[in-house]
DNA sequence: ATGGAAGTAGACAGATCTGTCTGTTTGAAT
DNA sequence: ATTCAAACAGACAGATCTGTCTACTTCCAT
């Protein structure tokens, strides 16, 4: 690990497996996709698959970790794109919802979908809870920075709008939902800041 | 079908199957529950099962139809309990959410969970869409009766809060979510009616 | 050059799941 | 009393799915 660039290397096979899982798990659901399908589509040997992911559940958890990375990144980007004012950021993060819903093959929130298939005590379910709590905590920080009277309540209200948009956004393909979510967020933020129009 | 009361009779075996499916499908997910389990727990013969439900999918659809009955009834009851004013009913229907989340073994919205396991074109998925549209339509009627400036937008906003509460309510067991949803609904309703506090 | 890590290819075992089929029992209406 | 529909009991076929195991290849670092 000194000469060329050998070092970590992250294993191309593992990446291919994870890419395939990301695509198929989200599109069809975790239970609906067999390991054989993932193995075939990622062009990997079965032994290699089980070397990297001793059980299918481990792959499911890795899949959710990747979703968390991506989605959290998109939320933060959307918030920052709204400017410096935390109040504007609280509204602006809903642009990530619009973008997500417009995406082709959108099928709702990967975490909620995964939790729907999982047993309450399982690792997959726990990751979902952890993710939702992380997002809630981040929004609460913004709400606190914005000077909301009750930051926890405002944060909770905004996550309700966000999760509602994520969950139902895939059902009726009407593009108004994200817009309504954003406008409602503005109303709730203004109200929480005492700026009633 | 003239004398006693013979007539429809609805078949006790069918009821038992449906009761068991209602319980197990919701608690563990549709795919996670095999027909053998349902047959065993409902104390029914396999032939009887397949006589009433030619395929497992038919049972899943019947399950969702029953959920629709129950949940729609609870929503309407909660709304009516809030009084005559449509604006109050729009807020009061969120009491159904509180009740649902408090229930032991609550595991989110049965429709969203079912849709997460289903393929977009499938009967199960279609029922979910139909249900969500029905609820949206009903709320829009209330919003219109209340005299909202944009009834469609208000209805959409309220369903976002409702679906958000249903979807995420099972994840962190904090009982504040339904309360926040109700309070937020009041804010949005007031705003839509021009009654800014 | 050589040893070892990582990957390929695919057979195999064992469990599970859906749906079919045969045969028996029950119960009510004619 | 007999007939007929509904339900019971359970074996069985066929598919699928997870996870294990053997054997061969490739390639880099020592």
Image: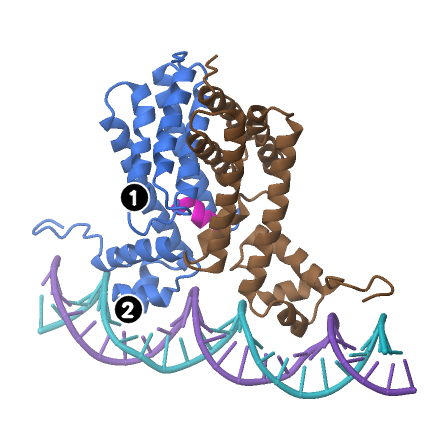
Chain colours: A blue, B brown, C cyan, D purple
Residue A102 badge: 1
Give B128 or A39, whichever is nearer the viewer.
Answer: B128
Q: Are marks 1 and 2 in contact (CB under 8 Å)?
A: no
Query: Is-magenta flag for residue A111?
Result: yes
Residue in the image at 59% along x and 58% along y? B62
Q: Nearer the viewer, mark 1 or mark 2?
A: 1
Give x and y (percent) for residue A129.
46, 39
Q: State which quadrant residue A162 falls in.
A: top left
B114 in relation to A51, above or below: above
B35 in relation to B105, above or below: below
Give x and y (percent) for residue A45.
28, 68
- Which quadrant would the C terminus of chain A be assigned to in this image? top left
Give x and y (percent) for residue A87.
33, 19
Residues shaded magenta: A109-116
Residue in the image at 70% along x and 68% along y? B44
Give A18 or B142, whichever is nearer the viewer.
Answer: B142
């Amino acid at each position: 690990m000194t000469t060329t660039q050998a070092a970590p290397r992250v294993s191309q096979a593992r990446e291919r497996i994870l890419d395939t899982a990301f695509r198929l798990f989200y599109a069809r659901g975790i239970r609906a996709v067999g390991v054989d399908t993932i193995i075939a589509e990622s062009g990997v040997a079965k032994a290699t698959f089980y070397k990297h992911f001793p059980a299918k559940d481990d792959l499911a958890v890795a899949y959710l970790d990747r979703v968390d990375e991506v989605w959290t990144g998109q939320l933060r980007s959307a918030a920052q794109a709204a400017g410096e004012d935390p109040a504007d950021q609280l509204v602006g993060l809903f642009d990530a919802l619009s973008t997500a819903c417009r995406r082709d093959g959108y099928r709702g929130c990967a975490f909620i979908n995964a939790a729907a298939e999982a047993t309450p005590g399982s690792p997959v379910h726990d990751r979902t809870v952890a993710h939702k709590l992380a997002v809630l905590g981040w929004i609460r920080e913004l709400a606190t920075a914005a000077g909301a009277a009750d930051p926890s309540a405002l944060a909770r209200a905004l996550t309700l709008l966000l999760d509602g948009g994520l969950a139902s956004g895939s059902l009726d393909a009407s593009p108004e939902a994200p817009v309504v979510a954003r406008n409602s967020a503005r109303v709730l933020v203004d109200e929480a800041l005492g700026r009633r129009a």
